[in-house]
Image (tube, rainbow, N blue to C red):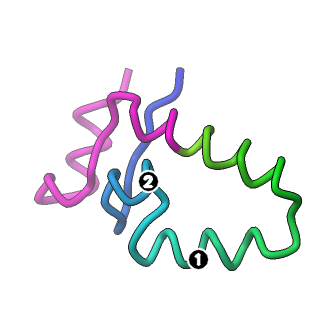
Amino acid sequence: MVIPVFYGVDPSHVRKQTGDFGKVFDETCLKSTEEVKIQWKEALTNVANLLGYHSVTWGNEATMIEANRQ
């Protein structure tokens, strides 16, 4: 089971590789091939599209974790 948790980053920035996340992503990919960069972009888009939890919408991180434990 995969439950993405977006901590300190907006899920749409992960999905589209924009904002501060996009800047760091581009810096991280400087030494990668275009093929690898495309694979990572697709993976990040897919994970951001999964139903997950955006920590900003919870008042307390521990509560978020406890509420979503299996």
Q: Please state which amino acid type lies under the numbered disc 2.
A: Lys
Image disc number at residue 66: none
Q: Is residue 4 magenta?
A: no
Q: Residue at x 53, y 20 (%)?
A: 1
Q: How far from the left and from the top, in percent, is residue 36? A: 82, 50
Which of 10 and 61 lies nearest the eye of the viewer?
10
Could you tell me which residue is drawn at 43 percent across and 66 percent down?
A: 18
Q: Which residue is mark 2?
A: 16
Numbered mark located on residue 24 in the image: 1
| Position of residue 37 measured from the top left corner of the image (x, y, whole percent) | 74, 54
Q: Is residue 42 left or right of residue 31?
A: left
Residue ID at (39%, 33%): 49
- Residue type, numbered disc 1: Val
Which image quadrant for residue 9?
A: bottom left
Q: Position of residue 66 (x, y in %)?
A: 28, 38
Give the foreground label among 1 and 2: 2
| SS class, disc 1 | helix
Observer-nearest of 54 and 62: 54
Q: Say which element carries label 2.
A: helix
Kindly identify the residue that appears in the image at 75 percent across and 68 percent down.
Answer: 29
The boundaries of the magenta stretch are 45-70
State the CA–CA distance, disc 1 to disc 2. 13 Å
**Total label count?**
2
Residue 46 drawn at (x, y percent): 51, 33
The tag earlier along the polypeptide, 1 or 2, is: 2
